[in-house]
Image (cartoon, rainbow, N blue to C red):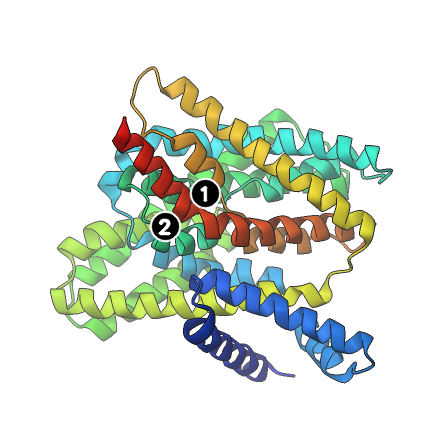
Amino acid sequence: MDFLNIAAILITISAVFSYINYRFIKLPTTIGLMLIGLVFSLLLLGLNHLGFSTIEHHAQTILHQIDFNETLMQGMLSFLLFAGALHVNLNDLAKQKWVIASLATFGMLLSTVIVGALSYGIFQWMGIPLPFIYCLLFGALISPTDPIAVLGILKTAHAPKSLETKIAGESLFNDGVAVVVFIVLFGIAVKGHEISVAHIGLLFLEEAVGGVIFGMVIGGITFYLLKSVDNYSVEILLTLALVMGGYGLATVIHVSGPIAIVVAGLMIGNHGRVFAMSEHTRDHLDTFWELIDEILNAVLFVLIGLELLLISFTGQYLIAALLIIPTVLLARLASVALPIGLLRAKRQFTPGVIKVLTWGGLRGGISVALALSLPVGPERNLILTVTYLVVVFSITVQGLSIGRLVKHVATVAMKK
């Protein structure tokens, strides 16, 4: 089956699921689509057990032709990050820069170590022989908060502006650190590399710092081009070229594509919006990228739900996942509380900030994509199953309740 037919099927399914969610279920779009996808997958699995295996077989055949890791990391991600960064206020981000930087770097690394160590203990206790380096690899892929899931849920959470900026900023920037850590641990676990501290530092500079610099360069060039014309169709095309060409070139020169696109998106969304566009262009640009964001989010979360058909579950793996979920939350709590505790001496924080940041640190498609990038084997099966269940819990339970937590925290703060 060719790309156009697969795309047609995914768009059609996403449209039908969106309609069902909007008309009858009325959940936040991302959560509703993923849950409908999960229910649909379970229904197909149930029909298979009853002897009606044809539909499930066709569904699995289609899903096997979609490389989820490639589709998200090399396809959708650049568009979704740019669309999200377009609407983040750079001044608000600058006010929270130290909090965001500490959470996206130190917090990410701390969470990786805690998840790795505790999950190793859990797997050993359960008699699952997963090497420690693979446990750290799991910690690296499950620790970063997913910008796609986070930004999608934040639209309906109504968090205070400062809290929303912290959560969104961290999720947009911690991918660079996560990718570096994942690459290093992947090299040790899978390829047997011996990697020095100097090599890790160089890799971080190349990926993360290089991504920032490259993002500023392509963002600056696009800003100049936008400023020199006044035609919304040309300007929208320029932003598309920035996203697609910029991300592709970042991959070629080995800098972080996600960070580069986020930086470029912040530049265009702030300076470009004010100094390089007419109001007419701004309206068209916002409408275009909002539609891109909504459509790709719909397809992505439907895909996450349907990925259930490709995952091999066992009772032992399910129990392990149930034990790992609170472990991931505990690691998130520590990785938030420690940096904020250290920063409290120099600045004030919104009451309940640790609770909201901990519960609002959602995991999503990026974690699943990284798990799927592991080589086929028992380690991959275990990590993929646990990752998938952590992501499902994060998006559904945390995503559905973060709004109520924000309201509760705000109410308590007002009473004080």
**303 relative to 168, above or below:** below
Q: Which of marks 1 and 2 precedes in the sequence? A: 2
Dots 2 and 1: beta carbons under 8 Å? yes
Residue 199 spot, x, y in % from top left: 60, 31
Residue 212 spot, x, y in % from top left: 39, 42
Tag count: 2
Q: Which residue is mark 1?
A: 360
**357 relative to 371, above or below:** above
Q: Which residue is found at the position 51% from the left and 54% from the top? A: 251
Q: How many neighbours does mark 1 have within 10 angstroms: few (below 14), some (14-19), or many (20 or more)?
A: many
Q: Which residue is found at the position 70% from the left and 39% from the top? A: 323
Please identify the quadrant where the C terminus is shown.
top left
Side of 16 where 185 appears, left or right: right
Q: Quadrant of residue 23?
A: bottom left
**30 relative to 284, above or below:** above
Amino acid type shown at disc 2? Ala
Q: Say the numbered circle drawn on residue 244.
A: none
Residue at mark 2 to residue at mark 1: CA–CA distance: 10 Å
| Residue ranking furthest to the top | 345
Residue 156 spot, x, y in % from top left: 36, 55
Residue 50 seen in this snapshot: yes
Residue 66 seen in this snapshot: no
Label 2's element? helix
Q: Which residue is found at the position 61% from the left and 37% from the top? A: 328
